[in-house]
Amino acid sequence: MEYTGSKYIGEYVDGRMEGKAKYILPTETIYVGEMKDGVFHGEGTLYFPSGSQYEAIWENGLAIKAWLNSPIWTHLEKSPRAITIVETASITLSRG
């Protein structure tokens, strides 16, 4: 994943990112939570550099239930769906 600029710290199953993990994106956004088959799946939180947090239950890379803890809400963070798509794309591009 070095070529994507992302860093994965976590468990693998059959060579796939799966289990408890910390995923650091080039934007310095950090995901901490569960992964399944290389995408966010289960409980997990996105931590943004601004200090905002996006806690969610994820299913196949998409947030299905979410809570927002946002002391500073920036323009780039206004669309949780867009964030999900970008973050998921970053993860799925790492498939070898």
Image: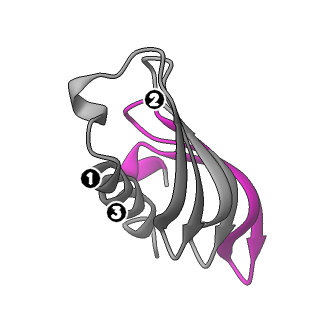
For residue 13, say whether it is visible: yes
Residue placed under numbered mark 2 in the picture:
28
Q: Determine which of the numbered discs, if any, sits on residue 82 in the image.
A: 1
Q: Main secondary structure of the magenta part?
A: strand
In the picture provided, is 7 more to the left or to the right than 96?
right
The residue lying furthest to the left in this view is 75
Disc 2 from disc 3: Cα separation: 15 Å
Q: Residue at x 45, y 29 (%)?
A: 28
Q: Residue at x 65, y 52 (%)?
A: 44
- Tell me whether the residue at label 1 lies in contact with that at label 2, contact meaning CB atoms closer than 8 angstroms: no
Q: Residue at x 35, y 22 (%)?
A: 73
The residue range painted magenta reads 2-31
Q: Nearer the viewer, mark 1 or mark 2?
A: 1
Residue placed under numbered mark 3 in the picture:
89
The answer to which of marks 2 and 3 sits earlier in the sequence is 2
Q: Rate crowding at label 1 as few (under 14), some (14 to 19) or many (20 or more) other CA atoms within 10 Å.
A: few
The amino acid marked with disc number 3 is: Ala
Q: Residue 49 at x, y = what percent? A: 45, 21
- For label 2, the SS is loop
**55 versus 14 height, above or below:** above
In the picture provided, is 69 more to the left or to the right than 34?
left
